[in-house]
Amino acid sequence: MDRLILKGMEFYAFHGVLPQEQHLGQRFIIDVELSLDLAPAGRTDDPEQTVNYARVFRLVEEVVTGAPCRLIEAVAEKVAGAILEQFPVSEVLVRVKKPGAPVPGHFAYMGVEIRRRR
């Protein structure tokens, strides 16, 4: 299966378990990989034969910056569900990265990765 990839989308939102996360907010980095057959789009050069990644970006932005969740697992589920509901893809992989997680120590990010199918 082919993949359409949206990597490193950044949004400011208020997800988290701790009160300061819910009040101050922080940056979240989202990666999405959509599995679908891209051969028709490649053969015809017809935008109607693929998924409009600008629309996917806006949907992810709407979900991530919308109603706060305590867990990034819930954010990932909401993103995956919205994509599967609105776009003709067979599978979606969603990564939610939290580079400012309130954990002492040095790290690039804490995150989750989920894969959901129709």
Image (spheres, rainbow, N blue to C red):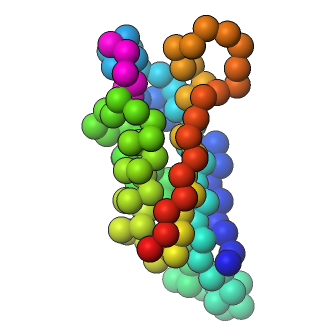
**Residue sitting nearer the eye, 36 or 72:** 72
Instruction: Tally the numbered discs.
Output: 0
Task: Tell me where residue 7 appears, x and y as whole percent.
Answer: 65, 49
How far across and down, in percent of the image, does residue 4 sit? 64, 66
Which quadrant of the figure contains the N terminus?
bottom right
**Residue 45 seen by the camera:** no
Residue in the picture at 54% in, 52% down: 114
| SS assignment for the magenta stretch, majority | loop
Quadrant location of residue 24?
Answer: top left
Q: Position of residue 112 (x, y in %)?
A: 56, 40
Image point (38%, 59%), residue name = 81
Residue 96 drawn in magenta: no
What residue occupies the far top of the structure in this picture? 104
Can I make out residue 4 in this image? yes
Q: Is residue 93 left or right of residue 88?
A: right
- Vertical comparison of 90 with 105: above or below: below
Tell me what residue is drawn at x 33 percent, y 34 percent.
69
Q: Could you tell me residue 37's position as x and y percent?
A: 63, 82
User: Picture quarter containing residue 109?
Assistant: top right
The relative height of residue 28 versus residue 107 in the rendered view (above or below) is below
The part of the chain drawn in magenta is: 14-19
Q: Residue at x 37, y 69 (%)?
A: 86
Of residues 111 and 65, the one nearer the viewer is: 111
The C terminus lies in which quarter of the figure? Answer: bottom left
50 to the left or right of 85: right
